[in-house]
Image: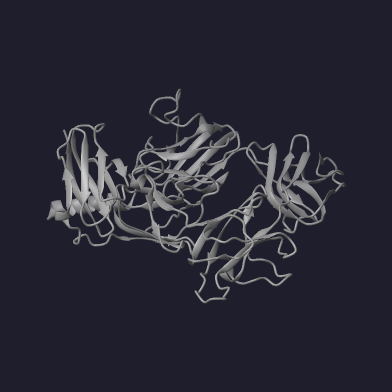
Amino acid sequence: MKTKLLSLLLFFAIAVGYSQVNSVALVGEAAGGWPGDPGNPGPTDLHQMTRVDADNWILVDVTLTNATAGGGVKFRANNSWDQPNPNWGSTAFPTGVGIVGGANIPCVGGTYTVTFNSTTGAYHFEGPPIPVVKLVGTAVSEAEGLTLTTSDAVNFTLTNATLLAGNAQFNIDVAGGSFGGSTFPEGDAQDAATMIPVPAGVYTSITFNLDNGHYVFTAAPVYPSIAIVGPGAGGWPSDPQVDANVLTTTDGETYRGTVTLTAWNGVEGSDTGNIKFRSNNDWNQPNWGGTTFPTGPNGTGNIVVNQAGTWDVEFTRSTGAYRFYFPQISLTGDAFGGWGDGFDFDLETTDGANYMIRNITAVATNGAKFRSNHSWDAINVTYGSTSFPSGLVSSPGDNIPVLAGDYSVTLNRVTKEFAFSPALATENFNSAAFKTYPNPTHNNWNFTSAKGAIESIQIVDVLGKTVLSTTPKATTAVVDASTLNTGVYFAKIATATGSKTVKVVKN
């Protein structure tokens, strides 16, 4: 009984948390380099923190450089990136709360005393004051002004700002006042009595140099507005009604968006399910139709939707060509063997909103995310959360702290709800209809299923690490074992009706 109790306690210790924090170090490009980089000193992290008590750590007089894109710093435990050793990051500086597996902290160069709590993740960098620069004036609707960000305490930037027609100045806390210039969109802010004359509009960036006072307002390009209208998308608009399903663009040529469509009801003469693209909320402006769904070239008639659902859409303004599609959403991450590039486990959907994957095995207690179309590109969406086993995702969100186990996973990309539920019962998995051969093998294992397609196969070593992974979605699959070391492995096979783990041997 004592042995069983100790084993049970050990299992829960591994399953519900990270390893014991024996040391914490500040690491990163801004702190001398990421551990493991060429030229970095040894396996022990350079900037080791001193333990104050069970939870709190301190590092005195550490000199950091300005964070560059992809640079910055993180806190990491036990001189290791390997799980279950945690590392913490955030987008906040100089004070914030680190999230396990979070982003690099975007520090400003200087010498700091750093404090960190390894239980709560709270941290603070105490050092040279970082100037606060705000855009203020009648052109700014926010009474407190708009705060610019900096990575070097000299160059300050404000992005995607919507301004009113009015005047503006830059308020600088270290200078004790506000300063403007007489020219727009570019000039030098050196006079406390002068206001910058700002036209109303959206600005992609506003930059200010603290050393010389030079500023630049960069206006966002103005492109035609294009929206999806019609009974299939909520109804025909009556001018001057503002269209609801407006697509986005970065170049005025390719427009993208997500829209929920209803289908034609099959009644002759009914325009239910009919849609068109139109520009600038106005029938006197260009509008586009088509004759086929979900893809097609420009046409004179209405596009008739033949399948309801929540669709992603891509539209080309110069040609009128369009494409409606359900995005492919997959699970990826260390919890499932790796991040992307061969470690995407696809969810299925029939309506473009509700996605599900049955019987997927998380092989380690580690992070994971949902992502669309097997891509990290900006036009695709990544979903994450700090909650587990259920909750709401955000984009891009944090890594989901998945625990090892077998799950059925659901995601609603409209409401952002997700859930990891215990996998469907596997007693219906027909072992007699399933074969693995040759076993042992020198080269390949062959897997066959007579009662349904094999959704996924994961080859796991005796330490629980996934060494091979494939999603054949067919009744037969071949797994190349030629590169594996000799030894015992476990093949975790999932079909639509169940999952099974079998021992396989490489000679």
Q: For residue 247, which quarter of the picture? A: bottom right
- What residue do we see at 69% from left, 67% from top? 242
Q: Residue furthest top?
A: 39
- What residue do we see at 58% from left, 35% from top? 68
State whether residue 282 is above or below residue 334: below
Image spot of residue 246 (x, y percent): 63, 61
Image spot of residue 178 (x, y percent): 79, 47
Q: Residue furthest left?
A: 1
- What residue do we see at 23% from left, 53% from top? 9
State whether residue 192 is above or below residue 38: below
- What residue do we see at 51% from left, 37% from top? 73
| Foreground pick, 507 / 313 | 313
Q: Quadrant of the C terminus?
A: top left
| Foreground pick, 178 / 348 | 348
Image spot of residue 228 (x, y percent): 62, 63
Query: Is 199 displayed left or right of 488 in the figure?
Result: right
Q: For residue 127, which quarter of the picture? A: top right
| Foreground pick, 133 / 119 | 133
Query: Is 112 displayed left or right of 484 in the figure?
Result: right
